[in-house]
Image (cartoon, rainbow, N blue to C red):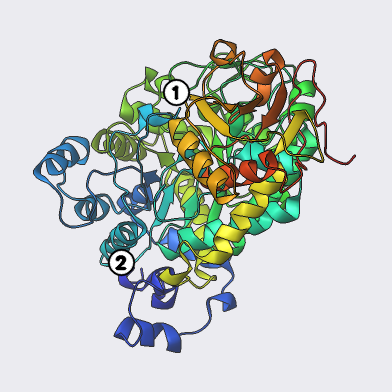
């Protein structure tokens, strides 16, 4: 058997670190003189590498846990204790080495993030800190005998689910892209976002969300989706995948086979998909098929009870869903990753048993096991007992390594691209195209004279809008004036103002069905969305967007051209 140290050619590993090393270093010189990665055949090369790995190395490739601490090698005493409890090692770098990890996810929490419950720590602070952390993690992985680089992922959906919020361009949320309705703008924006992520060492983004919303309010996915029309959502998802992956970041569409028609949250319960197979195929699966056609790197399996296929079994643990439907019927050949295994539907089993069941069901990467030590031991015991064959591990590792080889073909950008004007311009284009007037004038200012901004659940957005209005030449007051009422995430009709001249929905637009006066939707509370809103309010710009979900009693737009 060849020496493990020769499993992965150094130029492949170094390609993932390009940009992390300063110019003129030995690493840069080696990478410059090595054969081009494009000369490889990823599938064949990956299979050869995977076949030579030990059981322990194969298991490590399938694991993508989190870790405590903002640096690879030096963490606080509290983080060290938490890491020991979770993984039996003190630092993220030690965890990578101990388990021969194939990947690691970076996480954070925020007050209005519906996914925050699964994130037990925050290890992202700034682009510079993340770049240093990811470089340290990669060096830890490459110091191992097999020299296999990491997949380093995060949930950068933009909108409510955004891990890195400071120092990087912030795109509007997905529903704003759906309102803009222009796949070319979508692809450009996601390429800009992907370029930033790649520059700081993140090569997997658990985005875009491919869920199609139902036609009635009340679903849990909300503005994370591109809308309720399967064909339009498909076009948006494919464009986002193309944009991200052109930048060297693997996209991961979620939550297969579709979370958009559910009313309960898979973080805390097992949502039920009650539609029949024909409805599932027509209403939920098209965006996943579009992502497949766009060459998506990963599909995330959802913790969802698909009654028409495997009742009572979460899709993330069902071979009928992941093998029979996703791989056989849809023809998907890439990597399948579980949704977080520390979510309630997965915790009906012990961490070790859940890991084994997830692999047997057809997942390749096990995301965020609740206890890494137990998950690893469960897998190793299953291999030694014959419950999981080594060939099954090799199949998953081959897909994972093939993805790593594909990513290595795209040069890593320099840090100078982070928060660049080109990225901000791409974000502004989406925000401006998304603004929707559902009721009100189209060729005149929506408000005149002094403007008073009030908010429900949107204090940050209120400050951003007030600043943008001043920049647009409007007078902003705290008393009197024309009231512009902002309705934030999670707020409803009880938060409406009866005195508002303009009511603005910053998240899903359903609340506007109960509102009076002029009605506007931005679908996002980002800085660029508030700037675009200010331009429409003051008459400096039209509102070209169309609501990507039906709002009872209102047209998709009062102003957009048909």
Q: Quadrant of the N terminus?
A: bottom left
In the image, 113: left or right of 213? left
Label 1 sits on residue: 267
Closest to the observer: 180 or 482?
Answer: 482
Closest to the observer: 449 or 333?
Answer: 449
In the image, 246: left or right of 387? right
Q: Position of residue 414 (x, y in %)?
A: 44, 72
Residue 299 circle label: none
Mark nearer the viewer, 1 or 2 = 1
Name the residue at 56% across, 74% down.
40
Label 2 sits on residue: 142
Determine the image quadrant of residue 212.
top right
Determine the image quadrant of residue 119.
top left
The image shows residue 472, relative to residue 450, as above or below, that is below
Determine the image quadrant of residue 207.
top right
Q: How many numbered circles does the render carry?
A: 2
Closest to the observer: 448 or 81?
Answer: 448
Q: Quadrant of the C terminus?
A: top right
Name the residue at 66% across, 49% down.
430
Element type at mark 1? loop
Closest to the observer: 455 or 196?
Answer: 455
**Whether residue 289 is visible:** no
The image shows residue 495, relative to residue 76, as above or below, that is above
Q: Position of residue 123 (x, y in %)?
A: 29, 46
| Nearest to N terminus: mark 1 or mark 2 | 2
């Amino acid at each position: 058997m060849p020496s493990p140290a020769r499993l992965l050619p150094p130029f492949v590993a170094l390609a993932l670190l390009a940009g992390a090393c300063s110019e003129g270093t030995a690493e840069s010189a080696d990478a410059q003189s090595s054969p081009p990665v494009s000369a490889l055949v990823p599938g064949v090369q990956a299979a050869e590498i995977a076949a030579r790995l030990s059981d322990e190395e194969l298991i490590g490739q399938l694991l993508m846990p989190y870790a405590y601490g903002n640096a690879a090698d030096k963490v606080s005493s509290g983080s060290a204790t938490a890491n020991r409890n979770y993984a039996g090692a003190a630092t993220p770098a030690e965890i990578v080495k101990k388990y021969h990890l194939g990947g690691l996810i970076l996480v954070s929490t925020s007050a209005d993030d519906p996914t925050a419950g699964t994130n037990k720590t925050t290890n992202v602070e700034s682009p510079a800190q993340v770049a240093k952390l990811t470089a340290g993690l990669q060096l830890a992985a490459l110091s191992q005998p097999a020299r296999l680089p990491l997949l380093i992922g995060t949930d950068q959906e933009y909108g409510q689910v955004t891990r890195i919020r400071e120092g990087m361009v912030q795109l509007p949320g997905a529903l704003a892209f759906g309102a803009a309705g222009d796949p070319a703008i979508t692809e450009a924006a996601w390429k800009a976002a992907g370029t930033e992520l790649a520059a700081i060492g993140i090569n997997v983004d658990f985005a875009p969300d491919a869920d199609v919303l139902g036609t009635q309010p009340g679903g849990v996915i909300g503005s994370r989706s591109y809308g309720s029309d399967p064909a339009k959502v498909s076009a948006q998802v494919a464009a986002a995948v193309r944009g991200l992956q052109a930048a060297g970041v693997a996209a991961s569409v979620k939550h297969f086979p579709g979370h958009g028609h559910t009313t309960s949250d898979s973080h805390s319960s097992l949502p039920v998909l009650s539609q029949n197979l024909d409805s599932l195929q027509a209403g939920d699966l098209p965006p996943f098929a579009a992502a497949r056609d766009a060459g998506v790197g990963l599909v995330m399996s959802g913790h969802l009870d698909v009654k028409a296929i495997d009742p009572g079994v979460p899709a993330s643990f069902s071979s009928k869903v992941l093998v029979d439907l996703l791989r056989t019927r849809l023809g998907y050949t890439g990597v399948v990753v579980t949704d977080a295994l520390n979510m309630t539907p997965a915790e009906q089993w012990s961490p070790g048993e859940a890991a084994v069941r997830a692999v047997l069901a057809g997942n390749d990467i096990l995301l965020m096991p609740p206890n890494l030590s137990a998950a690893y031991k469960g897998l190793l015991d299953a291999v030694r007992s014959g419950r999981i064959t080594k060939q099954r591990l090799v199949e998953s590792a081959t897909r994972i390594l093939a993805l790593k080889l594909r990513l290595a073909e795209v040069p890593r950008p320099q840090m100078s691209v982070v928060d660049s004007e080109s990225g901000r311009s791409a974000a502004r284009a989406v925000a401006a195209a998304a603004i929707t007037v559902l009721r009100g004038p189209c060729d005149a200012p929506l408000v005149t004279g002094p403007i008073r901004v009030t908010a429900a659940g949107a204090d940050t957005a209120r400050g951003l809008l007030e600043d943008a209005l001043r920049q647009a030449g409007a007078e902003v007051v705290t008393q009197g004036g024309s009231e512009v009422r902002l309705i934030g995430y999670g707020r409803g009709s009880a938060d409406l103002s009866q005195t508002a001249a303009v009511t603005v929905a910053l998240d899903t637009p359903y609340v506007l069905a109960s509102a009076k006066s002029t009605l506007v939707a931005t679908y996002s509370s980002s800085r660029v969305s508030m700037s675009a809103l200010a331009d429409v309010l003051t008459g400096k710009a039209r509102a070209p967007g169309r609501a990507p979900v039906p709002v009872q009693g209102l047209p998709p737009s009062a102003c957009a051209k048909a």
